[in-house]
Amino acid sequence: MRSLFVHDAGMDVSNDTTLLSRMQPGQILARGVCRHLLSYDFVSIEEYVPERGKRVDVMALGPKGELWVIECKSGRADYMADSKWEGYLDWADRFFWAVDTNFPTEILPSNTGLIIADAYGGEIIRMAPEHKLPGARRTAVTRKFARDAARRLQGWRDPRL
């Protein structure tokens, strides 16, 4: 896959290509989104569950405590099948769609953010409007984000735990 975005020219792409071949299209978009968000000093968790029954593709936490939700859509059918996205608005200050360059972006709601991405990066095309979370919700989501991230790291470092 040729990237639309700048990445390390000297990196070993053989392992990367193997990894990417095992990923679903939405996971590839999420990877690029998470890489891009680092340039804004946002840290991310993929396939995050803010509460039972909800699973967002990417939840990102910014340097000032901002919380963004990004839903990755691999095509028109994937988007049309998603009837749950509006339920994610209560869990973030900003909501974005992440799609690739072939996606028909005109079908996405104009009152949401838009990120164009590939496996190696992305670009925010349209900034999502801000809807600040209430303080108690922000605190609860941020704590859960931190605990879940730490639990994932611990599981990665000690898989037999």
Image: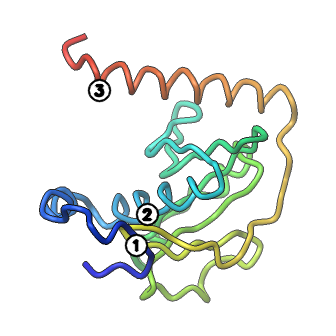
Q: Earlier in the sequence, mark 3 or mark 1?
A: 1
| Dot 2 and dot 3 residues touching (CB under 8 Å) | no
Could you tell me the amino acid type at mark 3? Trp
**Residue ID for mark 1:** 118
Could you tell me the amino acid type at mark 2? Gly
Image point (83%, 41%), residue name? 133
Residue 64: quarter of image: top right
Q: CA distance from mark 2 to mark 3?
A: 21 Å
Q: Give the structural element (helix, strand or loop) at label 2.
A: helix
The disc at residue 32 is 2
Number of marks in the rendered image: 3
Image point (58%, 32%), residue name? 51
Quarter the N terminus occupies: bottom left
Could you tell me the amino acid type at mark 1? Asp
Quarter the C terminus occupies: top left
Q: Is residue 152 left or right of residue 45?
A: left
Image point (46%, 68%), residue name? 121
Q: Earlier in the sequence, mark 2 or mark 3?
A: 2
On the image, the x and y values in percent for residue 130 come to 83, 58
Image point (43%, 58%), residue name? 30
The relative height of residue 45 versus residue 89 in the rendered view (above or below) is above
Q: Give the structural element (helix, strand or loop) at label 3.
A: helix
The relative height of residue 143 versus residue 16 in the rendered view (above or below) is above
**Residue ID for mark 3:** 156
Q: Earlier in the sequence, mark 1 or mark 2?
A: 2
| Dot 1 and dot 2 residues touching (CB under 8 Å) | yes
On the image, the x and y values in percent for residue 48 come to 49, 40
